Amino acid sequence: MRLDDYRWSALARYHDSAMESAVVLLAIARRPVHSHFDLHLQPVTGVRSHIRTMTEMQTFAINSRKSLEIANLVIPGIVDRAKSTMVHSSGETFGTIGAKETTPLCDSSFWWVVSRIVHSVRTVVLSEDEFLGATAMRIYSQRRDTIFGFASDFDGASARPSGYVVAVQRTHYVRVESLVSIYGGLGLKIDEAIAALRPPLKIPAC
């Protein structure tokens, strides 16, 4: 994209906002927190990073879907591609810290996922633990906030206290990196749409 695209193109602004959120989400998901050496960072890396992930994910979902909708008017088929690109393969799972069993990851399409995040009534951020080594006294590991969970009113979940149990039961999970990387691929077509919408260069008369 060019700097002047932001002045006239709503698509460029939506797309750029989605990409900015994607960068933040990717940085948080890839940031390792050591079990012992990073204890002094807990006030920063604990609840606050989860809240930031929830906020950025909502912004990412809204702006990425809007970008795809507008780009599809210029280059038909982009939305169909988003609807056919699965975030995870069927059968993929993840294991959180302290969990005895693994949990299935959502095997639906990018479009399905972001649409439900837009309409989410419950969100959660979960961490995956990586074993680093052990001594006679300690076990060393590092965690990353890699998993985002969401329950949508599309699935009958409700933000009301009486509907919270349903929201928990119908929570879907995705790896943050997998979700944003798909949009990175779709973004190449969105860039083409932005270029196609660019007004022709006006050459001043002599």
Image (tube, grey):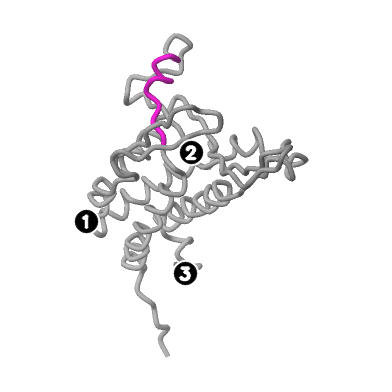
Residue 181 included in the magenta stretch of the image = no
Query: Which circle's residue, 1 or 3, is located before the other in the chain?
Result: 3
Bounds of the magenta segment: 164-173
Apparent side of residue 119 relative to residue 26 in the rendered image (left or right): left
> Residue at 48% of width from left, 29% of height from top?
123
- Amino acid type indicated by mark 2: Ile
Front residue of this view, candidates 180 and 146: 146
Query: Which circle's residue, 2 or 3, is located before the other in the chain?
Result: 3
Mark sitting on residue 76? 1
Query: Disc 3 marks which residue?
Result: 2
Task: Tell me the quarter of the picture where residue 153 sits.
Answer: top left
Task: Tell me the quarter of the picture where residue 188 sits.
Answer: bottom left
- Classified by dominant secondary structure, the portion drawn in magenta counts as helix
> Residue at 58% of width from left, 44% of height from top?
131
**Residues under labels 2 and 1: Cα distance?**
32 Å
Q: Nearer the viewer, mark 2 or mark 3?
A: 2
Apparent side of residue 192 relative to residue 120 in the rendered image (left or right): left
**On screen, residue 154 above or below 117:** above
SS for callout 3? loop
Mark sitting on residue 147? 2
**Residues under labels 2 and 3: Cα distance?**
33 Å
SS for callout 2? strand
> Residue at 37% of width from left, 64% of height from top?
191
- Residue 187 screen position, x and y as percent: 38, 59
- Amino acid type indicated by mark 1: Pro
> Could you classify mark 2 by the number of other residues whose Cα lies within 10 Å: few (under 14), some (14-19), or many (20 or more)?
many
